[in-house]
Amino acid sequence: MNYETIKTKLAHLSDDDASTIAVLLAINTIVNRSHSGWEGRDLVIRALDKFHLFDKVEQSLLLNMVRAVGLFPYITPHLSNMALSDRLAYEAHRVEGVEQGMVFHHLQAHVFSLIMQGRNVVLSASTSVGKSLVIDAVLAKRWFKKVVVIVPTIALIDETRRRLVRRFKDFNLITHPTQEAVADTTNVYLLTQERVIQRPDLADVEFFVLDEFYKIDLANDSEESSRAVDLSLAFHKLAKTGAQFYMLGPHIQRINGLDGYEYHFIPSDYSTVAVDIQNFGLGMRSEERKEKLLELVKTLESPTLIYCQAPPSANRVAEYLIEEAGLSPIPETQEIAAWISKHYHPEWNVAKAISLGIGIHHGGVPRALQQYIVKLFNEGVIKRIICTSTMIEGVNTSAENVIIYDRRLNKSTFDYFTYKNISGRAGRMNKYFIGKVFMLEAPPLEEGLTVEYPIGLQDEKSPMGLLMQLENEYLTDMSRGRLQEAYANPVLSPTTLIENRHIPIDRQVEVAETIIRDLPRSYGLLGWKGIPEQATQFNYLCELVYSLVGGNLMDYGISSSSQLAWHINELRTQKNLPAYLKQAVDKRQGEETASEAINLRLKFIRNMVCFRLPRDIMAINKIQADVLAKRGYEPGDFSFFAEQLENLFLDPLLTALDEYGIPTQISTQIKHLILPSDNLNDLLAKLRALAPRLEHLRLTGFEKGVMRWAVAEM
């Protein structure tokens, strides 16, 4: 029997089937072929899904094949049935110092061994492989006292932190810029690439991990986001010190540009789950696609992710399911639904959907809510999450099914790599042996992915923001020439250009020339420190910001500097998020739904107010300081205002708790009990001390539940 025949027979095995031994013997034949590793492993996993249908002798044979393909974690529940040789092999793969009963599969053991030999490793393998267990096993050895783990999102920082808190109570975990290393213990920095670049205390890191390393390629970036540039610089900052590294990501065939480093590249098709894919080939705007989605939602009873291209698509899918799926409210989520309605808006689909047992996870959903929705999903309280790439890129879930509703990523058709990455979210080791993927449109053509490290592959298109941060010995002659030309600009100093590397040079020069042209009036409008006291000062700052990044603001419906000033003033003076969102709903135009208006405002807060705008204000701060000082004026200082904006004009320590799963709406209610605090660690200690008294606080049941969950893993 060939692979497809056996796969079909396994799918149809039943209690009274007499062909079980024949099927197992056929699988054994494929397992023993040297050239068909993935087929044998896949069939063994599918047979494990039917384990209860085999008798004891057949189960023993199957467990022998499990050992042969290296899937030792699947043996753990069946230790009593194992032969001595299988038991010895199992013990050799046991993970020390993490959790009792944890064992490596073959690939994990191989990677761990290489790292313990002092080798740099670049691993490309599917999501289900369990690449993070290798990280924890390395940490458990306690060989390295200073470790950095670079992850692409705040959500992944939180997920990794929670895992490490459970396993390593004595480690000092650093996730926030205000936290510092502690002597005589293991310090593990869990950071995004931006935070790695900002920290001045990483020169003596011994080992670092770069998760989702494919994001280092500039093809995954844009001029406006520059996250690939930041990731490249973060890697460079740590690797140039000689620190050992472990890079991991899915489905990459080659990596170019790392010639300056010795490393062991492992492109692997190893998987711990089998995946069945159904391609329906339905039209993008066809009614059939919506009908098929509805049919699947009604028939799939196990945990399901529904992938959509972007928040507007997720919103439309949520609206459709809310109205058409015939779902009943579930008792367990009524309190969180009411809380979301009160603190955001009752027309927001996130509140309506969670009431019916559907989570929504995209860039417009605040982080603490995202984290809690994933918690409810992994605990089985809700069975469905409508998500975008924010969840596909690294957040671990226990989903058996993935429905790919859109064949797009943001504004373009996604490629085979993204398709495989999304599909890799189906199935879970030791829980769902066979993941199920339902591709509603036609799948993309199969193709390999090569990742390019831009620092090692400099050319005439290399971003200036990347080159300006590199030491001379890492620059090519061409790059040195380009920098020399850029620094010849007479208006701004090289120091200012380097510090503002996220902003194109021509835009910086335009702002500088505007300030010079407006002198001496511009000095009166820019010479303030702390908070702008006059409306004219604030409005002038908004004019400069808009001239710097106005194109980005158009994406949020902001088409002038006066509109930008209105939004910031609303957030600064009112500090009333429900009212701010209600205004968006009341003033929406055309066919925009209430949820779309809310999502846009929340995305503006997250992407612009809490990230881009403070960075841009600091860029203008450096430009005006450069321009005014050269002309004998005392510069202003906008750093306090930028920090206030970044934290929505709340105490920065309270907004930091959002990353720990506590929404600011809750932390502000208890701030009198935890503030003032010297730093984030001091604040976290006060929260832990507060935990026994939670029941006596004037919080709702849901709010107390959030606090208990968050504090338990701090």
Image (tube, rainbow, N blue to C red):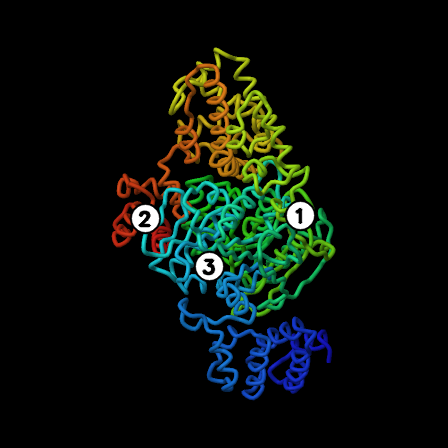
Mark closest to the chain's N terminus, 1 or 2 = 1
Q: Relative to 662, say whether 712 is above or below.
A: below
Q: Relative to 192, say whether 602 is above or below.
A: above
Check residue 605 in the rendering and tell me which mark sits there, or answer none: none
As drawn, which residue projects farthest toward the top? 520
Residue receiving disc 2: 684
Mark closest to the chain's N terminus, 1 or 3 = 3
Mark closest to the chain's N terminus, 3 or 2 = 3
Q: Relative to 592, say whether 698 is above or below.
A: below
Horizontal and vertical percent for residue 483? Answer: 61, 32
Horizontal and vertical percent for residue 616? Answer: 51, 30
Nearest the eye: 575 or 152: 152
Nearest the eye: 118 or 317: 118
Q: Is residue 676 visible?
A: yes
Disc 1 on helix, strand or loop?
strand
Q: Residues within 10 Å of mark 1 (few under 14, many from 20)?
A: some
Between the C-alphas of marks 1 and 3, the distance is 29 Å
Disc 3 on helix, strand or loop?
loop
Q: Residues within 10 Å of mark 2 (few under 14, many from 20)?
A: some
Left or right of 194? Residue 488 is right
Quadrant location of the N terminus? Answer: bottom right
Horizontal and vertical percent for residue 668? Answer: 34, 40
Check residue 408 in the rendering and tell me which mark sits there, or answer none: 1
